[in-house]
Image (tube, rainbow, N blue to C red):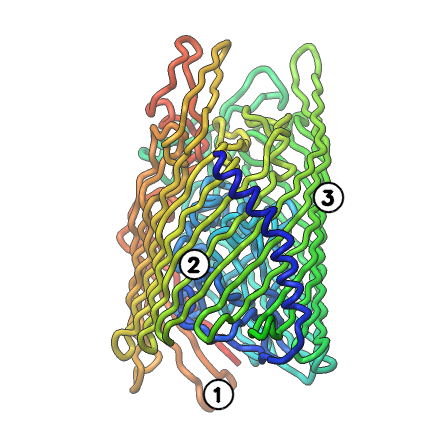
């Protein structure tokens, strides 16, 4: 670890002043070479984007009168791009998970209810079954990651988007705190892309129904697009019905060519019943938890939870998810405004402010949480195109501040009578502030070689208090945990891109990332209850990327990237038992390495093949785990063990045909396979969630309507999980345990009967829909 400390520490100290100075020089250089904003061609899954322009293109502007993007394919990054074709436009994309698996390196798991999905990049966040961590999420350049690092995809309806960029690898130099795994940048459809309005409906198995509409257009200096949807379903498991409503507005006003205003508003309301998470043994008996309405008559393989009869202490009774009325009732509201001003032909200044509130009422499992997380996010930056020592360059500097005020109350659950609450067991209030700066410069050393240097520095402070309560016949016991933690982190980045020809591009990159603990991490103990966990440290990683992109002909792209990342104090979460809250700990050292491949091949007229493959090998290099039971405590060396939750291999492969000409033009179909390897679900690697392969098939038709009021008709039908494979879509990592009498580690048989882990994936489902454009 000494070598890693020197790299992460010494390199940052040596690079800080040099890189900030270099970026500032680039930002202040004379405007000898102006560069027009470039609208990138939208590709299906382009890997790292083919052969870019020889002049560095740190894209900062969108189309005229359109919503600008803060980051649009900067040079040297490992980025895969997903557009609407075969991914959103002509299929019933029921959740963002079915879209993001089209990117190499992305793993998708079922979250807690409805269309909630857990997304990880290169295995980061694969251990979570709640919020998104270890990545930054943006939409139209506005951050949707709150200051505690939390994002959710409940509010993300795939129908709203025209393009999604997935940034892979450490990205803190570009995006700041929490970008150790990467970033995802969503781009909604602008008014000029829509140019009218659209209405659509999807319907399918298990009561699925989605009604949505989109309207957009341009009028003088104004441009607007509005998307709204109502989605509901019964779910394929007992007690898993849901309904969710989303509104997504993007509007811009361009009073002069040099001044642009952009408004972004998102609101999502979610009401979802939650099925119980089972043990691996229960999953094998009853994967979809059917016949589990009442504990007294429950079918084999049903999960029950033991609730205190009085909601506080003493006698308990078993209840099912239905009897407990497990729910999520969440609202997310985002209001954001950006002002852009072109100081001159080469210089753009931008300031944006985001208000983001996450409000929730979640009576599920053995505890219930209610709270509100309002936050503010301010970013101001300057981009300059010019010359640096006579070389074409783009310089970028930014200052960012964000703040989160959180209040959350946690209760025991009480049985029956709807989602009844028991005694208060946790009352948490905290404030998290992040203040930092970023700088970056891209320099065209020659027409074929571009060098990139960047750095961020950020200060984080978390102050707060958690009051924990326990109950007994003798009375109530209260304990207090206070925290005032301060973190200071820096993240340098260097990259070199070489384009020997228009067909080939070679990339090399070394970058660092950091993720500070969230306030909520500091107050959940290893027992899965509110309390003191304030010793957590910042997660840091140092990553090396080496890759190549090949575009030999139009319609053919191939990319391959190898990566090796060294983690220090990796934040890992796991469940201590059925229904308890997941807690977080630091693994002192670990390594992540792998290969990512993306390919897109239009191999004959109308035919197209797409593939996204990822190999991920993650293991602890230094971690001794202490486990206690009764009066016994034992230590276990986990060095060399695989990190739980991360499959070694995953693949999406799709082959499709669209009739290019003739009377059947617009008719198309495709078949795709999604494969995921097995993965460990405990630190001792005693138990694995089995891998799976599912097949999806789609047929669609699009036609222009001449002579009528409507302009275009889209019709589609899809069968997902064509062969009705039973598979695990989500598995919460489980804590290992020891015998309270012998001190020996309990084996796989004990873990296999530990509930609170498994959700089965959906069985064969049929979904069809249509959309009319006017």
Q: Residues within 10 Å of mark 3 (few under 14, many from 20)?
A: some
Q: Position of residue 677 (x, y in %)?
A: 31, 45
**Which of the pair 177/531 is nearer the observer?**
177
Mark 1 / mark 3, whichever is N-terminal: 3
Query: Helix, strand, or loop for circle 2?
Result: strand
Residue where numbered disc 3 is placed: 405
**Which of the pair 140/752 is nearer the observer?**
140
Q: Position of residue 708 (x, y in %)?
A: 48, 88
Q: Residues within 10 Å of mark 1 (few under 14, many from 20)?
A: few
**Which residue is pictured at 31% across the width and 39% down the height?**
690
Quadrant position of residue 123: top left
Circle number at residue 708? 1
Q: Position of residue 544 (x, y in %)?
A: 44, 51
Residue where numbered disc 2 is placed: 508
284 in relation to 205, above or below: above
707 in relation to 459, above or below: below
């Amino acid at each position: 670890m000494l070598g890693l400390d020197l790299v992460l520490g010494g390199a940052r100290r040596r690079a800080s002043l040099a890189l900030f100075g270099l970026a500032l020089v680039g930002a202040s250089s004379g405007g000898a070479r102006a560069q027009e904003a470039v609208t990138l061609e939208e590709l299906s899954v382009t890997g790292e984007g083919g052969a870019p322009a020889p002049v560095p293109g740190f894209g900062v502007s969108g189309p005229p009168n359109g919503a600008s993007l803060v980051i649009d394919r900067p040079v040297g990054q490992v980025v895969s791009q997903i557009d609407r074709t075969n991914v959103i436009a002509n299929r019933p994309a029921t959740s963002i998970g079915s879209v993001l698996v089209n990117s190499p390196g992305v793993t998708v798991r079922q979250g807690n209810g409805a269309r909630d999905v857990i997304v990880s990049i290169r295995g980061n966040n694969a251990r979570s079954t709640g919020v998104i961590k270890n990545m930054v999420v943006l939409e139209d350049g506005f951050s949707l990651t709150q200051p505690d690092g939390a994002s959710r995809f409940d509010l993300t309806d795939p129908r709203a988007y025209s393009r999604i960029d997935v940034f892979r690898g450490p990205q803190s130099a570009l995006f700041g705190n929490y970008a150790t795994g990467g970033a995802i940048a969503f781009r909604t459809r602008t008014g000029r892309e829509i140019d009218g309005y659209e209405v659509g409906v999807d319907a399918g198995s298990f009561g699925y129904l989605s009604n949505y509409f989109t309207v957009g257009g341009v009028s003088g200096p104004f441009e607007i697009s509005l998307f709204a949807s109502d989605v509901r379903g019964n779910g394929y498991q007992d007690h898993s019905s849901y309904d969710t409503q989303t509104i997504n507005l993007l509007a811009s006003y361009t009073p002069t060519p040099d001044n642009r205003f952009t408004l972004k508003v998102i609101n999502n309301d979610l009401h979802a019943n939650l099925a119980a998470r089972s043990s691996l043994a229960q999953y094998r008996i009853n994967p979809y938890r059917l016949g589990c309405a009442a504990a007294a008559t429950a079918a084999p393989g049903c999960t029950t939870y033991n609730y205190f009869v009085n909601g506080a202490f003493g006698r308990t009774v078993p209840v099912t998810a239905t009897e407990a009325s497990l729910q999520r009732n969440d609202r997310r509201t985002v209001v954001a405004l950006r002002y852009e001003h072109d100081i001159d032909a080469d210089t753009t200044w931008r300031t944006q402010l985001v208000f983001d509130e996450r409000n929730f009422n979640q009576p599920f499992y053995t505890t219930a949480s209610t709270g509100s997380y309002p936050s503010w996010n301010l970013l101001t930056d300057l981009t300059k195109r010019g010359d640096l020592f006579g070389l074409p360059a783009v310089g970028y500097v930014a200052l960012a501040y964000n703040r989160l005020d959180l209040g959350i109350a946690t209760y025991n659950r009480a049985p029956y009578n709807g989602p009844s609450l028991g005694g208060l067991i946790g009352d948490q209030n905290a404030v998290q502030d992040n203040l930092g700066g970023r700088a970056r410069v891209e320099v065209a050393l020659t027409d074929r070689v571009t060098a990139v240097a960047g750095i961020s520095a950020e200060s984080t402070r978390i102050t707060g208090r958690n009051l924990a309560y326990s109950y007994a016949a003798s009375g109530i016991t209260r304990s207090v945990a206070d925290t005032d933690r301060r973190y200071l982190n820096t993240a340098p980045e260097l990259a070199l891109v070489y384009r020997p020809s228009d067909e080939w591009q070679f990339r090399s990159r070394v970058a660092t990332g950091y993720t500070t603990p969230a306030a909520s991490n500091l107050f959940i103990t290893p027992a899965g209850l509110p309390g003191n966990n304030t010793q957590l440290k910042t997660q840091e990683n140092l990553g090396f990327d080496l890759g190549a992109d090949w575009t030999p002909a139009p319609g053919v792209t191939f990319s391959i990237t190898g990566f090796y990342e060294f983690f220090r104090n990796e934040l890992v979460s796991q469940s201590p038992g059925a229904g308890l809250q997941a807690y977080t700990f630091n693994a002192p050292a670990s390594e992540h390495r792998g290969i990512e491949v993306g390919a897109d091949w239009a191999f004959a007229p109308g035919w197209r093949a797409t593939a996204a493959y990822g190999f991920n090998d993650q293991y602890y290099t230094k971690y001794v785990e202490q486990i206690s039971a009764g009066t016994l405590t034992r230590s276990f060396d986990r060095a060399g063990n695989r990190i739980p939750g991360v499959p070694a291999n995953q693949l999406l492969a799709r082959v499709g045909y669209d009739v290019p000409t003739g009377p059947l033009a617009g008719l198309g179909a495709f078949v795709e396979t999604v494969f995921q390897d097995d993965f460990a679900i405990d630190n001792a690697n005693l138990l694995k969630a089995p891998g799976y392969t599912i097949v999806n098939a789609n047929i669609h038709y699009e036609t222009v309507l001449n002579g009528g009021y409507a302009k275009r008709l889209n019709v589609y039908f899809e069968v997902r999980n064509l062969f009705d494979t039973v598979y695990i879509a989500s598995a919460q990592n489980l804590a290992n345990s020891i015998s309270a009498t012998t001190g020996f580690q309990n084996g796989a048989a004990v873990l296999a009967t530990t509930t609170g882990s498994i959700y089965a994936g959906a069985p064969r489902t049929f979904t069809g829909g249509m959309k009319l454009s006017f």
